[in-house]
Amino acid sequence: MSNPDVVVVGGGIGGLGAAFSLTRQGLSVRLLERAPAFGEVGAGIQLAPNCTRILDDYGLLQEAKSLGVVPDAMVMRDAVDGDELTRIDLRDLENRYGYPYMVIHRSDLHGLLLRACERAGVELITDAQVTSYENTDDGARVTLASGETHEAGVVIAGDGLHSVARKLLVDDEPVSSAYVAYRGTVPAELPRVRSTDLSEVVVYIGPACHFVHYGLRGGELLNQVAVFESPKALAGREDWGTPDELDAAFAGTCDFVRDGLPYMWRDKWWRMFDRDPVMNWVHGRIALLGDSAHPPLQYIAQGAIMAIEDGWVLGEHVARNRAEDGTVDWGAALAAYEAVRPEHCRRVLTTSRKWGELWHLDGVAREQRNVLLRARDTYDYSFTDWLYGPTALTPDEEPPMFTPIPLSSAAVEDSKGEPLALTGSGTP
Ligand SMILES: Cc1cc2nc3c(=O)[nH]c(=O)nc-3n(C[C@H](O)[C@H](O)[C@H](O)COP(=O)(O)OP(=O)(O)OC[C@H]3O[C@@H](n4cnc5c(N)ncnc54)[C@H](O)[C@@H]3O)c2cc1C
């Protein structure tokens, strides 16, 4: 086999997106996936306009829309009493950002990218577990568990949360949030689905738990996600997040949420880890991408989107740093990538953590949060402009962050009209 221009490690959404983007720039790309077959586990995924804009640029948006659902609204409710707190009109949001907010089954998004890679001529190799990475005189090399090696002008490591490549740049470990996610889909013919508005993405936020639902596959399925803080994790136990904790975690929530729990898959759950942000993603001709660089907590639903954005930005910088004879100035392209993506992803990672804390408040803090959310104008985009606009290619294109509103600015009263005070723990 002759050496390709690029080796991509990892056939998740990030690796496939990068492989497609670089092939689109005329490069030859070989993708190495450790699993025996390509695939994605899990159920739904939300794709905001900063992702659908890129899918459109790739010529893949219509196919994505035909496989997914473009909902009318995103609604946030209190998980305890079920009351609506705030909503976003997703049709108006599409007008503002020029691209839709949509939801899609993970395997449909993964399949869409895989087919695009096949059509574009990406060399797709399975059963290829990369065990080490090294720079060479004119590029980089990876070694597989089998002992086989692959070399290219650049290696893109899209090898996920437990990335081997990341160790070249930083000596860190995934950070446990002590939260765990249960997922499940419900077929449309069941009464649970008939009692649910599939045109809405809904999140119920509650003390140390939340519950999300939305329709998938044109309304054939209801996707549900139940997330809670595991008491066993907090107690330092190894066996945390098990199904016996699920029902107890939601005992204090409203009927609609509790009625959804029997439909969760109980044989598989996802412990929620992220990592602290790092600002260096490039080691010679080896670059991190996707969860290997920036695994987030999922509260603002941007993990896969950031991975797709990384690949698109890399492709655009290849185009800007390519000589007429086709040679890529990889030093310049990777430097431009590293100049813009880590800061954006740092913002997403830190905001995701804060957003999760806000969702899971209890006591007076929960009431203060609810006051602030209820006061939000449906058409106020000051909290999404930093995220849903066009993906920045250079640091000066990165939009300013939103200004947080302090919880303490919301006055809450007890039943006698007396002001309630916030204690350090967030509970009265
Ligand atoms: C409950 C939950 C809900 C989420 N919801 C959303 C959402 O709504 N929107 C959103 O954008 N994101 C969401 N995310 C985040 C999103 O799923 C991830 O950020 C995204 O899938 C990461 O993609 P990736 O390709 O970088 O990594 P991965 O999906 O982890 O892919 C890595 C790939 O590399 C392969 N691999 C690993 N090591 C090696 C090796 N050594 N050699 C070869 N191959 C290797 C793996 O087998 C895998 O195929 C959610 C996550 C969770 C847990």
Image (tube, grey):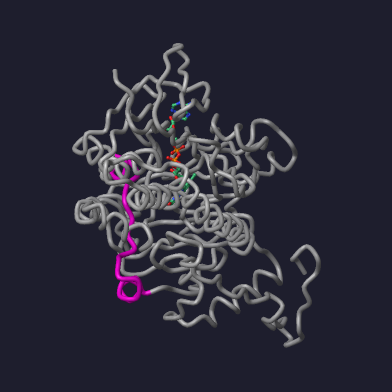
Whether the magenta-drawn stretch holds residue 401 is answered as no
Magenta-highlighted residues: 89-110
Name the foreground residue: 81 vs 312. Answer: 312
Q: Position of residue 85 (x, y in %)?
A: 51, 74
Q: Position of residue 150 (x, y in %)?
A: 40, 21
Closer-to-camera residue (42/59):
59
Query: Quick one: which residue is furthest to the bottom in this view?
Result: 417
Image height check: is 369 above or below 410?
above
- Residue furthest to the right: 424
Is 258 positioned to the left or the right of 37 in the image? Answer: right
Residue at image position (37%, 42%) is 13
Taking depth in this image into account, of 199 and 137 the one nearest to the observer is 137
* Residue 350 vs residue 168, the one in the foreground: 168
Quadrant position of ligand 1? top left
Q: Quadrant of the N terminus?
A: top left
Q: Position of residue 246 (x, y in %)?
A: 56, 44
